[in-house]
Amino acid sequence: MQNELTELRNQVRTLKRIVYGFGCLLVAGIVVGATSMQTVPDVIQAKKFEVVNDEGKVVASFYANMGGGMLSFSNKDGEVVAGLGSDEVNGGGVLGINNKDGKIVAGIFANKDGGVARVLNNTFTEVVAISATPYGGKLQIFENGGKQVAVIASGSNGGALGIRNKDGKSVAVLVSSPLGGALEIRNKNSKSVAILSASTVGGVLSILNKDEKGVAGIAADKDGNGVVRTMDSKGQSTSTTP
């Protein structure tokens, strides 16, 4: 009798192990099956995606335009404050920054020569521009009315600096030349009245009249001496020292 009870207990234990093992296999199969059903898709397509805040206002959107893709960001009041995308005119990238009222105040884009950065005031007038040119870089400064008042640029001989008056007329130019540097001073009508430059033997200062004709000059000669020369309005020499 005792032997039969012992054998029965052993059979019950074996049955429990079988049932437990089958249960584990069943759970594992369900988990694997559920995981395979929730695989991440390779591509999600839509014409527009929007992100909204707790109030339901759109704060970011990703969409297609005439130039390609565009990503825009809005502030809590719904005004667009930044945009990144493809420029439909030049075909390159473009970044626009707006103020809190949604008016553009800065932009970066690509053109045929490279990159361009623009800064605008609150009246949508350009006041600073930085760009790439075939010779290098260029920086332009504008007054609030949009007239250029200064420019720094690289040229074929090196650097150049130009200054303009409030009317937008050039009044001073500083450039590098094959012989060194050169400074040109102009009157309010942008006519040259003085030129200071380097020569092969030293410096040269030329004074011009209102008609831009040379009337006086100071220079170093090949012997290292100074020379002063004056001329009349027709360009005829009137005196030379020494």
Image (tube, rainbow, N blue to C red):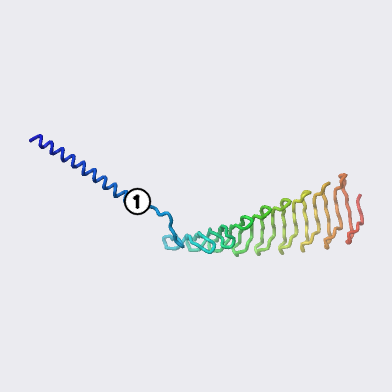
| Secondary element at image label 1 | helix
- Residue 178: x and y, percent? 77, 49
- Which is more toward the observer, 27 or 104? 27
- On screen, 133 above or below 65? above
- Which is more toward the observer, 96 or 99? 96
The structure residue drawn at horizontal position 92% and vertical position 54%, both measured from the top left corner, is 239
Quadrant in the rendering for residue 121? bottom right
The structure residue drawn at horizontal position 64% and vertical position 60%, both measured from the top left corner, is 127
Give the number of marks. 1
Figure quadrant of the N terminus: top left
The structure residue drawn at horizontal position 66% and vertical position 53%, both measured from the top left corner, is 137
Assess disc 1: are there few (<14), some (14-19) or many (≥20) residues with their C-alpha within 10 Å of its C-alpha: few
- Which is more toward the observer, 4 or 156? 4
- Residue 84: x and y, percent? 53, 58
| Left-right relation of 42 to 221 | left
- Which is more toward the observer, 179 or 3? 3
| Left-right relation of 105 to 14 | right
The residue at the far top in this view is: 3
Quadrant in the rendering for residue 186? bottom right
- Residue 219: x and y, percent? 85, 50
- On screen, 13 above or below 131? above
- Residue 96: x and y, percent? 56, 59
Disc 1 residue type?
Answer: Ser
Q: Which residue is denoted by mark 1 in the rendering?
A: 36
